[in-house]
Image: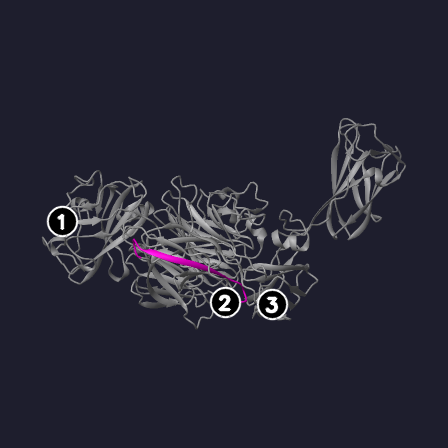
Amino acid sequence: MAPRPPWRVVLAGTAAAALGFTALSPVSAFAADTDYESESAVISQGAVESNHAGYSGTGFVNFDNVVGSYVEYSVNAAQAGTHTLTFRYANGTADNRPVKLTVDGGDKGTVDFPGTGAWTTWKTATATVQLTAGVNKVRTTATTANGGPNADKLTDTFVAPTDGEPPTPPSNLKASNILPTAATFTWTAATDNVGVVRYEINRGGNILKTVDGNTTTATVDNLTPNTAYDISVGAFDAAGNPSQQSNVVTFTTPPSDDTTPPTVPGNLRSTGVTANSVSLAWNASTDNGGTIAGYDVYQGTAKVATTTSLSTTVTNLNPSTSYTFTVKARDPDGNSSAASNAVTAKTSAPGGAGGIPEYDKDITKVDLGWSVDFLPNGNALVTERDRFELVLVTPSGQKTTLGKVPGAVTTSGEGGLLGLAISPNWSTDHAIYLYHTASGDNRIVKMTYDGTTLSSTSTPVLTGIAKNRYHNGGRIKFGPDGKLYATVGDAKNSDNAQNKSSLNGKILRLNPDGSAPSDNPFYATGGNARYVWSYGHRNPQGLAWDSRGQLWAAEFGESSQDELNLIQKGGNFGWPSCEGTIGSCSGFIAPKKTWPTSQAGPSGVEIVNDWIYIAGVTGQQLFATQINAAGTGIGTVSTLFSGRWGRLRSVTKTPDGGLWLTSTNNDKNGGTPSVLDNVIVRLKFPGGSTPGAFKLTSSAFADNATIPDKYTCAGDGTAGQDPSPPLAWGAAEGAKGYAVVFADTANGGNKLHWAIWDVPASARALPEGLGAGYTVPGQGGAKQKAMGSGANAQKFFGPCPGGSSHPYAFTLYALNTATVPGLSSSSTMAQIETAIKGASTANVVLRGKSSAAA
């Protein structure tokens, strides 16, 4: 048997290909396992024979039956250290045939070779010795007159200690000789306890070129003219440990001398209309320079969209109206093609259902608004990535900085203060969860916010998530099961994604206290694997659940494809072997949608009534698509607001039935926290669309008006057992039932007064004065529960704030089930609200005020 290579350098994906290597399976250390056939060794007083079956190679050595007969092997050790020598032998006698073991003449003791029962029965004996790097003379010498055993082969096994120490960051990165399509980079070498084997030159988190560990200058010749670049370099050792990134150099390549415009986009066509939108598609242009920088879409003479895609959807149009569109292509030097063919499309009549939102209004400006979540009273909390601040934003745009998150630091790249999730039990625990970069790791922490004050300290929930300038993941969200889910990037070490002992390259699932749920797929494995929900991810970010409780997630690709995935418990999504559908993808879970990495950069994800909305960073557009009836895939993907607000980071449904988008246009290099150039915008769903018709009203009072005394404790002077106000609503598409929760929301709180659920899907109203009883009389099996005890606990419990003016909220929930599971007449109000939220696909709020007192 030929000796196997004594060690392996593990390179994955693009990095391996760039150096001409084939990517191997991940290992954590150098490994050697080399065979040496006895018939090829130096033999004294013995013979090579082949008369007993079962040997390896071409035969075995039969020691002469004398003291001093020997076999000497030349063992070539790649590394000095402790080696295990395994001798394969046969001994058909009943006697032990020991040999003296020496290495380069040094005595290493005696190795016993007891009888094997037959000369055709082969067994092994082992010895542990110290070898030097290079050739070692390993001799086995017979010590009795019986000689030695029949010697088949020697196997040398060596496993070096695991190297967990990463290289230092490369430093002093500089760019020179910047041309339209090329630039040269030089840097000061990184250092490592074992040795640097390669450097990756990155643009953002994507690899432009890989060079070996002895190279500290390289020319990248695949750049685009007239384009801004931010470049850094990272080092890797043989164990796959990545350094932190070097300093970043920024520059813009000069224009080329190209004056030839691209070809005209072909076959512009309308692919669909709604009452407020027209969807367009066209055939790609070509350019003599090989690159199309983008397409500009015109409505008449007005430019209405800019995109790198071959489609867009124009919104905010009037119903039953004809519009004419053309498209032009641009190259990087600014040369524009002539206009495409013109296409005229007529929007549909108002009232048709659909999931295409339109622009409503600007809310406010923030700095790098990375994540948004809403409090029960309709106000939002927003994380600012590079300021490390948590901001309160009201629906009208009033903004209050609540404070900094302690311990949050930047990576001068994609790290900082990232994900945010408000506890489902916030009304009682006031807990908020945050994902942020710290001095030594990424981590999830818990803070408290009581509606007025943010705590000055945080409690670690999960720590030890590897960080890097790039690929930090960072989205966190509570699922319908009450567990906290987190997306974690591979931290620029692609081997992490397949290693279940690493928290990186995963979607994690944990209990709110930071422990691992016992029903996680790899819980029994122990260690970090207990937290793993799915793995094989590069840099996942968006998380959202559909009406079936299925989890969907978006993921940034390397250089080929971005992904939208339907997550499976314990599923392996293929990175680094597979990127989207490219690479060695057999046996991995395929994405439900892929995009070229230049067109998407999918970040935040939201689902409303089984419509998926995805915020595109790189593509600078919002994607919208509907989950199919089987829940197994998606339909046509619309691209919205192309180029309108730049890089879109998050999309979040609002309590009143809209969407908030955050843009993060200064986030490519660690941001500029002194500049507030990132906007939060509100989108709305036009009348008749999903979920615009889903609105709660009362004929007794208007939104945010005073609730009449007759529905409060002032009506009869007693708290509880009040008549309920009349309520009505528009249908939510796909709803299988409805629920209403009534709460006191003073000071950002959520004091639960009353809930009704299992309201039939056919219902569109609740009458005034609902009857008493856990099962509500005359309401098709609907159930109710209220605060208090006795009769008060099974009838509407109206406002009774004790004489001061209080805000209240009726929240209507669309349910994905006709019967909310797990509830009974003994369930608490908090349990009821949590179960309703877990079964909800959308909700809207009707606000009211009261100063009633008993």
Which x, y percent locates residue 191? 66, 64
Answer with left or right where residue 494 lies relative to residue 345: right
**Vertical arrangement, residue 358 with respect to residue 145, above or below:** below
Amino acid, disc 1? Pro
Q: Is residue 611 visible?
A: yes
Q: Which numbered disc covers residue 723?
A: 1
Q: Is residue 67 magenta?
A: no
Which x, y percent locates residue 651? 39, 57
**Vertical arrangement, residue 842 with respect to residue 780, above or below:** below
For label 3, the crowd category at 10 Å Cα-Cα, with few meaning under 14, some 14 to 19 and many 20 or more, is many
Q: Considering the numbered disc 1 on the image, is that residue within a helix, a strand or a loop? A: loop
Q: Considering the numbered disc 2 on the image, is that residue within a helix, a strand or a loop? A: loop
The color scheme shown is: one colour
Q: Which residue is mark 2?
A: 670
**Mark found first going from the N terminus, 2 or 1:** 2
Answer with left or right where residue 460 lies relative to residue 54: left
**Mark found first going from the N terminus, 3 or 1:** 3
Residue at mark 2 to residue at mark 3: CA–CA distance = 25 Å
Residue at mark 2 to residue at mark 1: CA–CA distance = 56 Å
The magenta segment is: 318-335
Q: Considering the numbered disc 3 on the image, is that residue within a helix, a strand or a loop? A: loop
Q: Which residue is mark 3?
A: 180
**Mark found first going from the N terminus, 2 or 3:** 3
